[in-house]
Amino acid sequence: MEPTTLQEATVFFADPENCREWVLSRRWPHGVECPRCGSKKVTFLERYDRWQCRARHASRGFTIKTGTIFDHSRVGFDRWLVVMWLVVNEGYGITAQKIHHKAGIPESTARYMLQRLRYALKMVSTDNRRAR
């Protein structure tokens, strides 16, 4: 079930399990793989909410945020995914001040998140233009 309103998105993404499953299905549609070596031989460590690659290399442990715009962010997926929903579904663009009011997060955090999301969207549109 995909959320269709801001209220549904807020409720749906409030559950950490929903967040993990939603992001997993989009990041790794064919199964989790190590972001460093690409191996599919990984083990989920539920206690730590992270995976460990079975291949021998540095930094074998990783989370769902590793190697993404969410990496090194203390903001949880419950906030990230609601803000992403707002950015994608706002017809004429959205400001950090609107995100601050609608998502109930500090304006400085909203600016930080919006900057990262715009960067990621710019990269995607640039990649799509090159592929044509």
Image: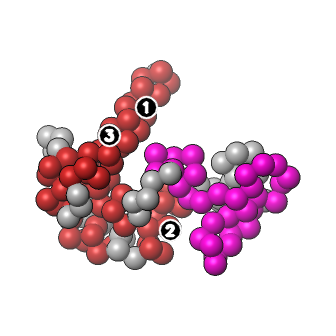
Spatial CA span between label 3 and label 2: 25 Å
Q: Name the kind of residue labelled 3 in the image.
A: Gln
Label drawn at residue 21: 2
Label drawn at residue 123: 1
Residue placed at 20% from the left, 64% from the top?
104
Would you say 50 lies left or right of 124 here? right
Q: In the rendered image, which residue does mark 3 sit on? A: 115
Query: What span is in magenta?
Result: 42-71
Residue placed at 50% from the left, 68% from the top?
21
Dots 3, 1 in contact, CB < 8 A? no
Residue placed at 78% from the left, 49% from the top?
58
Residue 58 in the magenta stretch? The answer is yes
Q: Provide residue 96's location: percent of width, then percent of height.
A: 20, 47
Residue 49 in the magenta stretch? The answer is yes
Viewer-nearest of discs 3 and 2: 3
* Residue 65 visible in the displayed image: yes
Q: Provide residue 5's location: percent of width, then percent of height.
A: 21, 65
* Residue 89 visible in the displayed image: no
